[in-house]
Image (cartoon, rainbow, N blue to C red):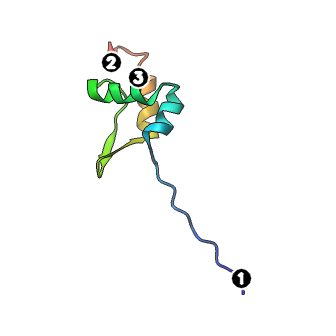
Amino acid sequence: MTEQPVDVLVSPLRNSHEVAAFLRVSESTLSRWRAEKKGPPFIRIGGVTRYRIEQVEHWLASLGTDEHA
């Protein structure tokens, strides 16, 4: 009998560790940005901070515009 492949759902959300590594900053810097409301957009699910990578990339691209000046 062969086993059926199981579809694995991969979350589109990233945790602080992953986003900090992506941005090449420390997790404490990311935390400070959240507190100062100046970092990438985030959501909280059950008290846990998560990021949508598309929004992180959009935020990063917007740093070169007058939007954040």
Under mark 2, the amino acid is Glu
Under mark 3, the amino acid is Ser
C-alpha gap between disc 1 and disc 2: 56 Å
C-alpha gap between disc 3 and disc 1: 50 Å
Under mark 1, the amino acid is Thr
Label 3 belongs to which residue? 62
Please say if the residues under marks 3 and 2 sit with CB atoms less than 8 Å apart. Answer: yes
Label 1 belongs to which residue? 2
Q: Considering only order in the chain, which callout, 1 or 3, is on the residue closer to the N terminus? A: 1
Looking at the rendered structure, the secondary structure element under dot 1 is loop
Q: Is residue 51 above or below residue 35?
A: below
Frontmost of labels 1 and 2 is: 1
Looking at the rendered structure, the secondary structure element under dot 3 is helix
Question: How many dots with numbers?
Answer: 3
Q: Is residue 29 above or below residue 56?
A: above
Q: Position of residue 6 (x, y in %)?
A: 59, 71
